[in-house]
Each structure stands twice: as structure tokens, then as C-alpha cells.
Image (cartoon, grey):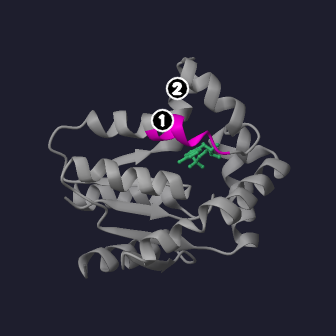
Amino acid sequence: MLNIVLFGPPGAGKGTQSERLIEQYGLVHLSTGDVFRANIKGETELGQLAKSYMDKGQLVPDEVTINMLRSEVMKHENPAGFIFDGFPRTHAQATALDAFLATLNTEITVMLALEVQEDELKERLKKRAEVSGRADDADPAVIQNRIQVYNNETAPVKSFYQEQNKFTAIDGIGTIDAITERLFSAIDSI
Ligand code: AMP
């Protein structure tokens, strides 16, 4: 299996690039943010809980997120692999993911980390707010909080994969096509 962690701060282009990668490699796209948003739309209990954190730009608690991720993975029979988009976001999530994939006799192949500086992220999120309809894109204070949470809690997850020699940084600045090419060539050289 080809299991990719597509990593990067909010607004780095993870969702956009995931669409390209699933097409090219026949992978299952698993975005924890998308699953939470679907639950909010469906007015589930999980959605209600997730919303209370997402609206403030905070992380949904690890236990809830990890359980949800596990059940999403189990929905797929004989997948070619997964793109984990927006997961893991904490060290505890990364550890849990490794342990869970081991029970399925598989593992993370690579973490591809899209690198984009903060002023560019804010610009992109501001533009995305006009079309995404996402409450957490519309409020500059929430955006600031999401970037801060990324820097404090999520960015350190890189070292978890660096220690396993599974980390590759990708320049996330440029056209969507150019960034896709960088991702393809990183994957093809594994
Ligand atoms: P995203 O769509 O990846 O930008 O995620 C939107 C929001 O969903 C985040 O700001 C968090 O509140 C929540 N979320 C998504 N993925 C996770 C995760 N792996 N751990 C905790 N919270 C998450």
C-alpha cells in the first residue's frame, strides 16, 4: 500500500493537491476536516462536538479524532492506499496512526509536507473564505488561532516522521500544476 501523510498549515493546498494525487495513484482521500464538516451538516452528535472546537480554530480532542479516523479507514476494502489530509495533527495522533496501521499490516510510506509562509497562507485563506462557506475561514482571529495551533502542536509532528526517514518537504509556492509535479516526482522517486 502507498500511504501518504499530506502535511502542511491551513491554506497550504492539501485539499487541492489531494484531488490530484488520488487521481494519479488511485488512493483513498481521507480528510478529517471534511469528515467533521460532513458530520456537522448531517447534524450528528460527533458533528456537534467537533463544531464547538472548529468554530474557535481549536483541535478536536485526540481520542474523538483517532476513533473517527479508524472507523473511516475500516470502511474501505482492499484500498491501494490512503492520503491522510489534516491527520495526524498531534504527536498522539501520529503514534496512534502507526499502531493502528501496524494492526492492518501496513504503515505510512511518506510524509509530504507543503511549505508555505504565513503571509501567503493568510492571503489564500482570505480568498478561500469567499467561496468555501467555511466559518473558520471567514474570521481573521480564528485563522490566526489555527496557524498558532499548527505551529505549536502540529508542526512538531514532522520530527516523528523525520526520525523514521519518511519526511519530504515540498515547496508549496507556485502554480497548482507546478506543485502537483513536485509531489508526483517525490512519490515516484520513493
Ligand atoms: P481542516 O479542514 O483540515 O482545515 O480542519 C478544519 C478543522 O477541523 C480544524 O481546525 C480542527 O478544528 C478540526 N480538525 C481537522 N482535523 C483534525 C485533527 N486531525 N485533529 C484535531 N482536529 C482536527
Residue at (55, 24) in percent of width and height: 46
Name the residue: 54% across, 62% down. Answer: 13
Q: Is mark 2 within 8 Å of ligand 1?
A: no
Mark 1: few/some/many CA within 10 Å (<14, 14-19, 20+): some
SS assignment for the magenta stretch, majority = helix
According to the picture, the residue beneath numbered tag 2 turns out to be 39
Q: Position of residue 27 (x, y in %)?
A: 26, 53
Quadrant for the C terminus, please: bottom left
The answer to whether one can see residue 69 in this image is: yes
Can you say whether 135 is above or below 5 in the image?
Answer: above
Q: Which residues are magenta?
A: 59-66
Left or right? Give the position of 73 relative to 90. Answer: left
Image-based side of 180 in relation to 120, left or right: left
Instruction: Quarter of the image for the N terminus: give it.
Output: bottom left
| Along the line of sight, the residue nearer the viewer: 92 or 178 | 92
**Residue 106: % across, % down:** 21, 56
Q: Which mark is residue 186?
A: none
SS class, disc 1: helix
Instruction: Determine contact: label 2, label 1, CB under 8 Å.
Output: yes
Q: Quadrant of residue 48?
A: top right
Query: Given the image, on which type of amino acid does mark 1 rest?
Result: Val
Q: Quadrant of ligand 1?
A: top right
- Residue placed under numbered mark 1 in the picture: 35
Question: Label 2 neighbourhood size at 10 Å, few (<14), some (14-19), many (20+)?
Answer: some
In the picture as drawn, the residue positioned furthest to the right comes out as 141
81 inside magenta stretch: no
